[in-house]
Structures are given as structure tokens and as C-alpha cells.
């Protein structure tokens, strides 16, 4: 069971990381804001299972 949860977590990190990178590449915002937003999204990608457990976290994941 732990192995399955670890695999799901890794896949989520990869998926959310790709979304953050894609948003970084195609954004029209200025460089400092774009980079800061990508770093914030990458941090969120690492802790997404914790965010899924709270309603505020789920809303944050939906907003990006």
C-alpha cells in the first residue's frame, strides 16, 4: 500500500511540475513574478497530498 501511495505521489509531483513549467514557459508576465510563481508551484507540487486533505489546499491547487 505504501508503495502505491509513493508512486501516486511521484506521478503527482511530475504532473504538477510539468504544469508549473508549462505555465512558466508560456506566461506573458514579467520575469520576477513568473519565476516566483513557478517556484511556488513547484513547492506546492511536492506537498500536494497534504493540500488535498484540506478544502483550502484543494482550492489552491485548482487556482494554480
Image (cartoon, rainbow, N blue to C red):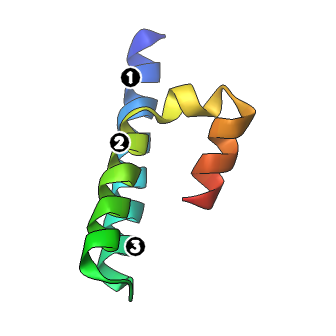
Sort mark 2 into few (<14), some (14-19) or many (20+) by Cα contacts within 10 Å: some
Kindly report the distance in space between the C-alpha atoms of the residues bearing marks 3 and 1: 26 Å
Q: Residue 47, position in %: x, y?
A: 43, 32
Between 32 and 57, the one nearer to me in the picture: 32
Which badge, 2 or 3, is on the more N-terminal residue?
A: 3
* Residue occupied by mark 3: 23
Q: Position of residue 40 (x, y in %)?
A: 37, 51
The residue tagged with tag 2: helix, strand or loop?
helix
Please tell me whether residue 47 is drawn above or below residue 11 in the rendered image.
above
Drawn side of residue 21 relative to residue 44, left or right:
left
Residue at numbered disc 1: 6
Instruction: Name the outermost residue toward the right.
Output: 55
Callout 3: few (<14), some (14-19), or many (20+) C-alpha neighbours within 10 Å?
Answer: some
Label 1: which secondary element: helix
Check disc 2 and report the residue beneath it: 43
Q: Determine the image quadrant of residue 21.
A: bottom left
Mark nearest the camera among 3 and 1 is 3
Looking at the picture, does residue 19 appear above or below residue 28?
Answer: above
As helix, strand or loop, the secondary structure at mark 3 comes to helix
Q: Residue farthest to the bottom?
A: 28
Closer to the N terminus: mark 3 or mark 1?
A: 1
Q: Position of residue 18 (x, y in %)?
A: 35, 61
Amino acid at each position: 500500500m505504501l508503495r502505491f501511495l509513493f508512486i501516486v505521489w511521484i506521478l503527482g509531483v511530475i504532473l504538477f511540475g510539468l504544469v508549473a513549467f508549462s505555465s512558466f514557459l508560456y506566461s506573458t508576465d514579467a520575469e520576477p513574478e513568473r519565476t516566483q510563481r513557478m517556484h511556488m508551484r513547484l513547492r506546492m507540487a511536492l506537498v500536494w497530498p497534504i493540500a488535498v486533505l484540506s478544502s483550502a489546499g484543494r482550492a489552491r491547487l485548482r487556482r494554480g
